[in-house]
Image (cartoon, grey):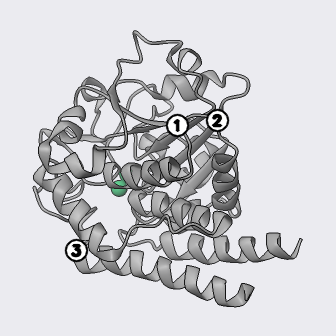
Amino acid sequence: MEIDGKAAALARSVEALISADVNARGSRQLVVPGDLLLAAQALLAAGSVAIVTGFFIAAAGAPETDGPPGALILARALVRLGKPVVLVTDAWCRPVFAHPALARWTRDVPVMEVAPRLEDGWCARHRITHLVSIERPGRAADGHYYSAGGLVLDPYVEPFDTWFLQRRPGLVTIGVGDGGNEIGMGKVLPAVRQHVPAGERIGCVVPTDRLVVAGTSNWGAYGLVAVLSYLTGADLLHTPAEELELVAATAAAGAVDGLSGRPEATVDSQPPEVLEDIVRALHEELAAAARRVS
Ligand code: MG
Ligand code: MG
């Protein structure tokens, strides 16, 4: 019980840290308190994990830098914990993962391009027990997929949210998002409609069992890895230097900043110094928690 209380305290600190509302999108109001810890605990019990990611920025003709880094760091952590894991994306976002610039990061993690319209039973066939979405568009109430700014993205989105909507018995679902229009946000749809600009129009109606909301979705994935580190005592979180390398590699692989649309090593307009600061702060939270334990 004592250990549970300490894990909950660490998870609350991490939840507060990663949900910094850096782009005034109401992210702080969308947080489901406690879901970060529950999501991490669920992943520890996972048999086999699929992580769906990739958000294509139609205006720039390229995927964004938010999503793939978080997915790769979470996947690496799960691999280190001995979990079978696969990254799943669509034809629009696959080229970034296939680019040599990301080779170091994709070496130990299989990345599959899947067309969910044709692969209805994919999760069952691959014996997936836990399905994670990181910064992946999910349908709004009118059935369309939207950018944060309200543009219809339907031609650029394979409907992975169908797998989440099916709610196959025994399949645990986890959503990570930052703007209200991603898979999982259906869990907090009234809050999205109240707090997110254009939330009425863009709010995703697809819920997940657990929802992690962050200032940028990468940070949500890093928060999960931080809590997994605490729960297992393993050093799973990447370093601030690796964060800079990974985001730069993602941009070099063809991704763009999701807000500016520019091919830069930034994430949702957050510059490199902010990105490395968040990772550094997560390490400090873990160190502080370790001191509390001893
Ligand atoms: Mg987003
Ligand atoms: Mg984002």
In the image, residue 41 lies at what x, y percent? 70, 54
Q: Mark 2 near mark 1, Cβ–Cβ under 8 Å?
A: yes
| Quarter of the picture holding the N terminus | bottom right
- The secondary element bearing badge 1 is classed as loop
Q: Label 3: which residue?
A: 271
User: Can see residue 288?
Assistant: yes
Depth check, mark 2 against mark 3: the one in front is 2
- Extreme residue toward the right, this view: 1
Depth check, mark 3 against mark 1: the one in front is 1
Give the vertical position of 12 relative to 158 (above or below): below
Q: Residues within 10 Å of mark 2 (few under 14, many from 20)?
A: some
Tell me the quarter of the picture where residue 292 sits: bottom right
Q: Label 2: which residue?
A: 47
Q: Give, as a three-letter code, the residue at label 2.
A: Gly
Q: Residues within 10 Å of mark 1 (few under 14, many from 20)?
A: some
Horizontal side of residue 277 vs 42, given as left or right:
left
Establish whether ligand 2 lies closer than 8 Å to the Cβ of label 1: no
Q: Label 1: which residue?
A: 84
Cα separation, mark 2 vs mark 3, equals: 36 Å
